[in-house]
Amino acid sequence: MPWIDQIADEPQWSSRIFIRRFIPYFKISKKEELQLFIRVLKGFANRLPFSNKPRFEDLDIALSLFAISNGCFRKLKNFLDSALTEALITDAVTLNKHCLSSAFKAWRPELDNVFEMDVNEIQGCEVEQYSTFKPDGPQDEDPFIDTQFCKKVPLVQLLKK
C-alpha cells in the first residue's frame, strides 16, 4: 500500500510494527527474474494437496500465470486459490491446464483465456512504477498514484531481452 510508509512512521504505529517487508512484483524480462518466478510457481505446486504435482514450470502455464497476475504475488495467489477450488470441486487428480482454464473463465469471462492461447500469443506487462501516495501535493490532484505498467506485449518478447 503506497501510504503504509506514512502510517508506519507515525510514532505509535512505528513502535508496533517490527517487521516491514516490501514485496516487489515479479518480472520476467531477465533470465534470473524468470527463474525466480518459476521457483515460486514450483513452490506453490509442491504445496498443493495433489499426489500428482502440477507442472507450473511449463513455459505456457508460467507465462499464462504471469499474464494473469502482471507479476503481482497477491493476484497470483488469489487466482491459484480459485483454480485449486475448481480442481477440488471437480475431483481433479492435479491442477492441470483444464482446471486453470476453467478457473480463468470464471474469474475473468470478458477476457480471452490465456490458457487456451498459443504461447506466442500470450500478452502481458511488467510493473514500471509502484503506486505512491503524496498527501502534500496540490489540492486539485489525486494524492494516490496507481501502479504503472509497461504496454502489453507478447510475453515471449520480454523473454528475448
Image (cartoon, grey):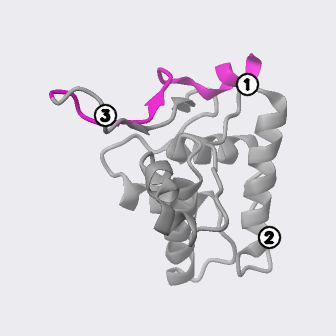
Question: As displayed, is residue 127 above or below residue 9?
Answer: above
Left or right for 48, reference 17: right
Left or right for 44, reference 89: right
Please state which of residues 152 and 58 is positioned toward the viewer in this rendering.
Answer: 152
Question: What residue type is disc 2 on?
Answer: Asn
Cα distance in 3D space between marks 1 and 3? 40 Å
Q: Quadrant of the C terminus?
A: top right
Where is residue 70 shown, x and y percent of the image?
A: 54, 40
Question: As displayed, is residue 33 above or below residue 44?
Answer: above
Mark 1: secondary structure: helix
The earlier-in-sequence mark between 2 and 1 is 2
Where is residue 133 shown, x and y percent of the image?
A: 38, 39
Question: As displayed, is residue 79 above or below residue 22?
Answer: below
Mark 2: secondary structure: helix
Where is residue 91 shown, x and y percent of the image?
A: 58, 83
Magenta region, residue range: 140-161
Question: What residue type is disc 1 on?
Answer: Leu
* Residue identifier under label 1: 159
Q: Which residue appears at 36% of the width and 52% of the height?
A: 108
**Is 144 within the magenta?**
yes
**Is 155 within the magenta?**
yes
* Residue identifier under label 3: 136
Which residue of the protein is positioned furthest toward the left in this rendering?
A: 140
- How many labels, in total? 3
Question: What residue type is disc 3 on?
Answer: Asp
Mark 3: secondary structure: loop
* Residue identifier under label 2: 46
Question: As displayed, is residue 66 above or below residue 47?
Answer: above
Within-10-Å neighbours for mark 1: few <14, some 14–19, many 20+: few
Q: Quadrant of residue 142?
A: top left
